[in-house]
Amino acid sequence: MCSKVVLFSVLACFAAVATTASCSGVVVCYYGAWSIWRSSSGHYGVSDLPVDLCTHIVYSFIAPTAEGGIYFTDAEDTVNGKSNKMDDFVALKQNNSDLKLMVAMGGWTPASTNFTIVVNNDTLRATLINTMVSFVEEHDLDGVDLDWEYPAQRGGADSDKEQFVVLVKELKAALGSKLLTAAVAVTQSNIDLSYNVTELNKYLDYFHLMNYDYHGSWETVTGVVAPLYAQLTDAAGTNLNVNHSVYTWIENGASPSKLVLGLAAYGKTFTLTSLDNTSTGAPASGAGVAGPFVGEAGSYSYAEICSDQAANATAWSITEVTGNYVYANKDTFWVGYDNANTIYAKAQYAKEMGLAGIMYWAADLDDFNGLCGSTYPLIKAGISGYNA
């Protein structure tokens, strides 16, 4: 049923090319403010953001206090000539007046603790809403992205699920014509715990589906970060893939036209226990070593992946499962990720399913310096795929 929604010609996009933002769907780019402190070729500020490619850019993160206030989870700063400051972020509109600039509240680090305190208290919730509206107005932002990870989980309360709906309803009313979106987990088990989808669908402008981290070094066998369809080695009924998640959200009551498909500009890394098996589902002893730019064990930005492969081409064994995912290893270092081809296929899938567009976590993880060719290859590939 869903695949028939968009079987039409997008004549307005006839002239669209990979170097311009999509004219038929949203291109949401998250920006991690902590990337200002990355070393070497990972050093990233708001001036690096691709304002000509993204339709929406989301500054990450602010978070709630237990009193209903807010704070920046990463200090505003200027490092080696690059800034992560909100005022400089807002100034990006001078380069593209159509660009929508938003702020995300939440993220992984704050968990549920202060969210739960605030949303379950009418007075504190009203304070938080007033604080958020004032923040948006002060900085002339276009909206708010709620990135609570996750209601009724990680220190939360059972009541969070319904109180999240109350927060969304009241904040949307207070924001008026401003955008209100939410970054959401994608499995049925998370929906059951955290989201009343049919009610949220009434008030949110978009759901930003976090279609990534299906696998990682918390597991004992290798797996790619975000397979579009089941991995070839998956057991029947595993269901840890993008396609299953999209149908799950639709079946739970989300409008396809409000769903934005999440795309990962990074891979998940493992250390193989041996070279006897280097496929998905291979035994692993833990995370892969940290990369030179992001410096995070278990994850490699796409820039780290492609630059290492370019510099050490003969050392890498790379397998691309067409239209689905890529995995590669250099000796016992293993990474499962997306390249431009698989991003293109996912964006085509989003269009065919009638989804609102595509979303990237995160712009600062793509090859923004052009170390491996043109700049922002994954973002450009997604735009081309959605408009194909």
Image (cartoon, rainbow, N blue to C red):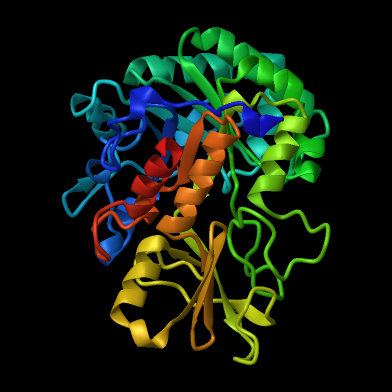
Q: Give the number of callouts.
A: 0
Residue 180: % across, % down: 53, 21
Q: Which quarter of the rendering shows the N terminus?
A: top right
Foreground pick, 43 / 96: 96
Residue 69: % across, % down: 52, 25
Q: Residue at x 28, y 42 (%)?
A: 49
Q: Which quarter of the rendering shows the C terminus?
A: top left
Q: Is residue 350 left or right of residue 249?
A: left
Foreground pick, 165 / 134: 165
Q: Residue at x 45, y 38 (%)?
A: 386
Q: Is residue 151 above or below residue 197?
A: below
Point out the residue furthest to the left here: 81
Q: Residue at x 67, y 20 (%)?
A: 201
Q: Is residue 163 visible?
A: no
Q: Is residue 255 left or right of residue 361?
A: right
Foreground pick, 117 / 5: 5
Residue 211: % across, % down: 60, 47
